[in-house]
Image (cartoon, helix red, strand yellow):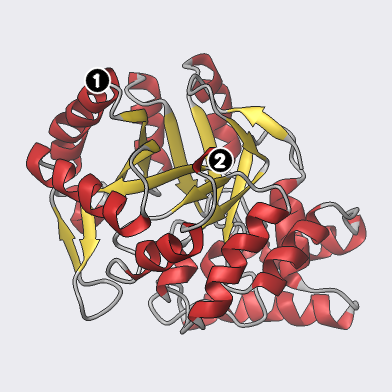
Amino acid sequence: MRYSKLGNTGLEVSNISFGASSLGGVFHDINEMHAIEAVHTALQVGINYIDVAPAYGATKAETVLGKALRNIPRSSYFISTKVGKNTAPGGYGVDIFDYSYDAIMRSIDESASRIGVDYFDIIYLHDIEYNNREHTEWALKEGIETLQYLKSIGSIGSVGLGFYPVDLWEQVIDEGIIDVGLTHNIYCLNDTRFLNLLAKAKQKNIGLINASPFASGLLTNRGAPGWHPSTKDQRAIFTKVAEHCSRCGSDISKLAIQFSTQNKDILSTMFSSANPTAVNQNVQWSNEPVDNKLLEEVLDILAPISNQNWNY
């Protein structure tokens, strides 16, 4: 495991980080005991940064994470959560947005209570582009001002944003209004637009974290969950890739995690799993050499949907 300074945050984070979305059953149903063990496994193998959000499973992910961290020394990990978006009971996609000062303060307190911590190293404004960017201006004004205030009084460590569109990332990086950016689905086998943001982010001393190396499940044998916006034809290409890897005696997930974690220009790549065996496997795979011939073949198959912009 490598450790690198994350922008100007003062944090030295592992090059692989743990996203807790799976603990909320976002991708498929989970076994809570296994999910708790997955968190413990991540910490045991040297991962020192965990991210979660109240929106994952309508607070379920934070609740399960709190159980996992109950007897873990707080000094042994960095942790972030998100504000501004929550998921109402009823499932993924039933979203409530509120980037006001009062909502952010309440959300942080509630998250802290569920997880059992009294301090977050990073707070992200979550999915500010949703609903055709209806809330983006609100988030970038009142939301950012609130987080900057909380940082100034020492209530949180760093100010962050977590969302998807590359053009919006270019805007906020240029403005230099954050310490950390949590991207997703823009540095994986089928998308490398993350690399275009790196130079700008370094100039502003903004730490960028790359999440979703498995493309929200597309780059797995299981495939993406039903809520993913890819079409039937697009999913068929990912199925073709997975089958090709299998015929070659490999696994599409292995190639995916290697591709994302072995680029040393990227400070940290975040994956999510509620399966302790998968956590161990992903870390092990990340340390093995890439099959460059297989990689070239897979990139060729994925070429028709390379850098595809999904409508999350």
Quadrant containing the N terminus in the rendered view: top right
Quadrant containing the C terminus in the rendered view: bottom left
Q: Which residue is mark 2?
A: 194
* Alpha carbon distance from label 1 to label 2: 32 Å
Q: Tell me the kind of residue under disc 1.
A: Ile
In the rendered image, the vertical position of residue 140 relative to residue 298, given as above or below:
above
x then y, percent, for residue 227 = 38, 77
**Residue at 48% across, 60% down:** 20
Residue 153 disc label: 1
In the rendered image, the vertical position of residue 266 relative to residue 33, given as above or below:
above
Residue 300 seen in the current view: no
Q: Secondary structure at mark 1?
A: loop
In the rendered image, the vertical position of residue 21 relative to residue 105, given as above or below:
below
x then y, percent, for residue 125 = 29, 42
**Residue at 79% across, 74% down:** 251
Q: Nearer the viewer, residue 257 or 15?
A: 15
**Residue at 39% across, 66% down:** 61
